[in-house]
Structure formats: C-alpha cells, structure tokens
Amino acid sequence: MCNKKEDNNETLYIQVGLVDCVVDYRGTGVYSYDTTLIVDGTFNNSDWSSFIHEDTGPNPGFHQAEQKTTGGNLDKYRELTHNWSAIGGDPAQFIHTVHIYWGESYNPSIAGPILGINFSFDLSLFAWDVTAGIRYTPMMVQNGVYYILPTSPPYEVLVTDSQWTHFSIPQVVESDFFVLGDPLGLGTPDFSANGSPIHFGYYAANASKQAGSHFTVSGIDNYTVSISSSPDPTLIPEPTTIVLMGFGLVGLLGVVIRQRRKEK
Ligand SMILES: [Ca+2]
C-alpha cells in the first residue's frame, strides 16, 4: 500500500495504478510506492491464458490449465496437468508452459518506473508418475515479448509436496529478466517511464530422462504481484503548478456556487 502522509494543506492525492497515493510536493516525502497489483485466489479461466512454449519429447505432449472450485489454499485454485514423453537417457525431454494473467497490468508510463517486483504464490503437487516435482518461475510480457527470470533458485521454485507450500521470490529488478527462449539469456524489459504496460504470470517446467510417457498434476493459488515504483519526476507537479491547480479548483467552485445561486 502507499505510504500516506496526512497533512491537510500540503499533500496532493493522485491516482497511481490501483491505489490512491499521496505525494508530498514539498520534495521531502513520499517518492516510492508499494502497490499490490495482483492477488488472485480464484483463477477465473477468463483471466488467464496458457500455451506450450517447448515440448521436446518424441511424442507430442499436452497441457491443461483450469480453475478448480475446491481443494485450493483456500477453495478455488488453478490446476495444471503436464503430459510429455521421453526417449530415455541424456538429454532429458521436457515440457514448458507459459501462463499469463490478463486481469490486471502495470503501466510504468502512468504509474511510475518500477524499482522492484515481489512475487509470491502457493504451490502443490497432487500427482505424478516418475518425476516427483514441477518447477515454477515468475514471468511477464511487455509489447508482445515474453520475459522470464532465471530458471534457478531463488527465482525458480521446485514443488514436490502435496501440501500447499508458500513461495516468495525476493525483490527482482529489470536486469533479472531476459527474453524467454533466448539461448544467451539476453534482452531485458523496460521498467522505466518509457515502458509499455506489463502483464505478469508464471512458467511451469517438467523434464524426464526415463523413457515413456509422463505426467504431473500441480496447483497454484494466491498468485500475488507487488510493485515498488517511483513516480517519474516529470509526472510530479511542481509546487507552483499545484498552487495554480488549487486556484483553478477554487475558481471552479466559485463558478459552481454562482451557477447554483442563479438557479435559485
Ligand atoms: Ca483460492
């Protein structure tokens, strides 16, 4: 939430993203915000989309991702089934799927440059054959380009437990991300005030070196994205501008009062 400074005469309320924030225009106060952008504990199917990013097995794999109404942490959650095949031996064959939440986005050019992002979610592994685990990694999409965090701890988490387990990914920054599928791990999103709107999601990965068909069934609940942002200095009105705005509002009020008097 915003750090609010209550000071009747010397604060300006502005709308930043989903929350009302306060700017101390005297230049001594609040210039960073923590906004909880997404908290999804229901996972309506219409809010999410998914696709297979890579499937290297000898036979085509498939996936299914959908809302379940009970059994989450609590109640509704999103269940993911991965089915894939492997030849056996090195290298492992794998299936990787992308899941994006479209119900909310963050626009740095309006809400301010992003200083850092916190991801957290609950995961559970319900069923599997030989691969007792599935890996989840936060990701995002901006301007149609998919970006992912490194597929290693602490960015990637491995869930092996049928009990719901809470995971929290520490504050990540722009340079932590790279273009999904880039072999060199290059290309970063734009968190600056020039950046386009960003949607968030996650990546799910399974692999096996054992020949045959394989599957996992896992669940995610309470997908949460929090943004630490800094308003673009050019978006913060100068004190004189605010004073003028204040005169403007007072003037407008005067007009309204005069109009109401005329109506009487
Ligand atoms: Ca839930």
Image (cartoon, rainbow, N blue to C red):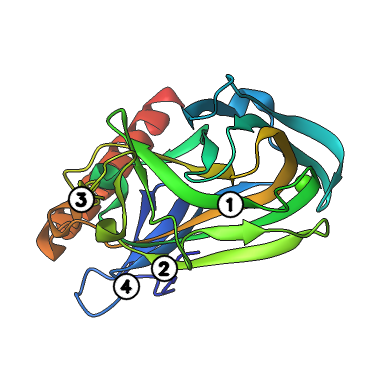
Q: Is residue 120 above or below residue 48?
A: below
Question: Which mark is on residue 135?
Answer: 1
Mark 2 and mark 1: span between their CA atoms?
19 Å
- Mark 2, residue position: 171
Residue count near mark 4 (Cα–Cα under 10 Å), binned few <14, some 14–19, many ≥20 = some
Q: Residue at x 32, y 49 (%)?
A: 111
Identify the secondary structure beneath mark 3: helix
Say which of 17 and 180 sits in front. 180
Q: Position of residue 221 (x, y in %)?
A: 71, 48
Q: Position of residue 171 (x, y in %)?
A: 41, 68
Do residues under tags 2 and 4 come within 8 Å of each other at their CB atoms?
A: no
Q: Is residue 31 above or below residue 87?
A: below
Instruction: Name which quarter of the figure residue 219 lies in.
Output: top right
- Mark 4, residue position: 30
Q: Position of residue 126 (x, y in %)?
A: 82, 47
Mark 3 and mark 2: span between their CA atoms?
37 Å
Q: Amino acid at mark 4?
A: Val
Q: Nearer the viewer, mark 1 or mark 3?
A: 1
